[in-house]
Amino acid sequence: MKIAFASDHAGVGLKAELIGLASTLGHEVVDLGPTTTQSVDYPDFAEKACLAITGGQAELGVLICGTGQGMNITANKVRGIRAALCHTEFEARMARAHNDANVLCLGQRVTGPGLAAELLTCFLATAFEGGRHAARVAKITAVEARR
């Protein structure tokens, strides 16, 4: 699977660790920046990653900032993106299985590297269940289309 990674300056370190993990798990990764801790604006990088997903250059995305909140808010403004800010494996699993989330958002300042690795592993290993959840995801898409 091809995964787009992006962060802001507050998420560069965790992003690098998770890119390594995703590669080890056999996934192709695209690092959309930044590569330094010089201050940048998270919306710019969230949008870049989300457009890579909606444009077909990646299947899933991982966005990291200080808390994950800014990335999550920005990502969910992009049509076709269903981003989930996750703090537990259960949330990561349900985001994929029930909501067909295509972006995982994390906060480097609030999530340690061990937990972040578990969240990413769970997110990538979980498939959308479809079934009754497909109708709900279709309703999310319909709300998005009306706005």
Image (cartoon, helix red, strand yellow):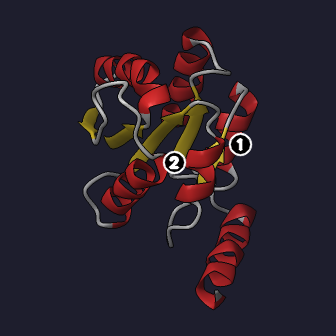
Q: Is residue 54 above or below residue 142?
A: above
- Name the residue at the top extreme: 114
Choose the circle earlier in sequence order: 2 or 1.
Answer: 1
Identify the amino acid type marked 1. Answer: Met
Q: Which residue in the structure is indicated by mark 1?
A: 94
Q: Locate residue 125 relative to residue 73 in the image: left or right.
A: left
Q: Locate residue 87 relative to residue 64 in the image: left or right.
A: right
Q: Is residue 34 above or below residue 60?
A: above
The CA distance from mark 2 to mark 1 is: 13 Å
The circle drawn on residue 103 is 2
Q: Locate residue 110 relative to residue 77 in the image: left or right.
A: right
Residue 101 lies, in percent from the top left, at 58, 52
The circle drawn on residue 38 is none
Element assignment for label 1: helix
Residue 36 lies, in percent from the top left, at 30, 25
- Circle 1 packing at 10 Å, graded few (<14), some (14-19), many (20+), is many
Instruction: Tell me the residue at 50%/73% (across/down).
Output: 79
Identify the amino acid type marked 2. Answer: Val
Q: In which quarter of the image is residue 123?
A: top right
